[in-house]
Amino acid sequence: MPRITKNPKERRDEILNAAMELFNSKGFEQTSVSDIVKKIGVAQGTFYYYFQSKEEVINAACERTLASRLEQVQRLVDSTDLKASEKLLYLFTEALANEQDEAVFEYVHTESNTSLHQKWMVAEIRSLLPFVRQIVRQGVEKGEFSTQQPELAAEFLLVGVSFWLDRGIFTWTEEEYAKKKQALADIIHRLLGGTVIAPDNVV
């Protein structure tokens, strides 16, 4: 059978996807490099061409997931169809992740990965902060928000909501989680001032 040649990005993503699926199903320690390459049908040397270790795979998967989310967040920030309040609600209540990234979220949020989860949250908050600040400034410029300290308000809001709605920290029921999401519009209103109306699709 002739060897199938793939471009580097496609092959790298294939390795990442296979590894994260195995880490979730078998566990990180129980998954070997041999398991990963066997799953996608390549030689072990192919793995080491892209990654030096399984730990590097985890870091790369998290970086890919975050980069994917930030691309979508930028499109949200640039949107002219939504109010600033609607952008914030969507940003805070929607995962904004591709299907291939679901395995990363599942792995990071498992109880045994507390340290990785904390690192992920810090990295995500730091990466999202410039976008949230920009959205809040948009709201102030449009007269939608009246806060006198948009930079600090944006930071407080992002950090607070990130922890409050994180199911990896709090084991909210679906009903509790839904109520918190519904209350978020009022929280944004009280923190940032102005009038905030929750979009119909945030439940």
Image (spheres, rainbow, N blue to C red):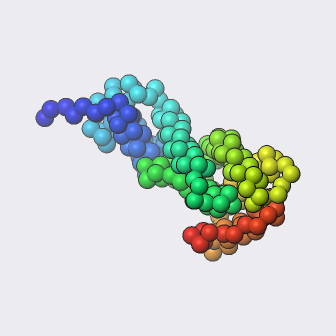
Frontmost residue, 93 versus 51: 93
- Image point 63% across, 57% down: which residue? 87
Residue lying at the far right of the rendered structure: 148
- Image point 38% across, 33% down: which residue? 9
* Number of numbered callouts drawn: 0
Frontmost residue, 125 versus 73: 73
Frontmost residue, 127 versus 27: 127
Looking at the image, residue 146 sits to the left or right of residue 200; the answer is right
Instruction: State the quadrant of the N terminus.
Output: top left
For the question of whether residue 167 can be seen, the reply is: no
Instruction: Establish if 58 lies above or below 132.
Output: above
Residue lying at the far bottom of the rendered structure: 175
Instruction: State the quadrant of the C terminus.
Output: bottom right
Q: Quadrant of residue 144?
A: bottom right
Looking at the image, residue 68 sits to the left or right of residue 122; the answer is left
For the question of whether residue 61 can be seen, the reply is: yes
x%, y% of residue 126? 68, 41
- Image point 44% across, 45% down: which residue? 20
Instruction: Establish if 154 lies above or below 174.
Output: above
Looking at the image, residue 169 sits to the left or right of residue 43; the answer is right
- Image point 86% across, 51% down: which residue? 148
Frontmost residue, 101 versus 53: 101
x%, y% of residue 113? 59, 47
Residue lying at the far left of the rendered structure: 1
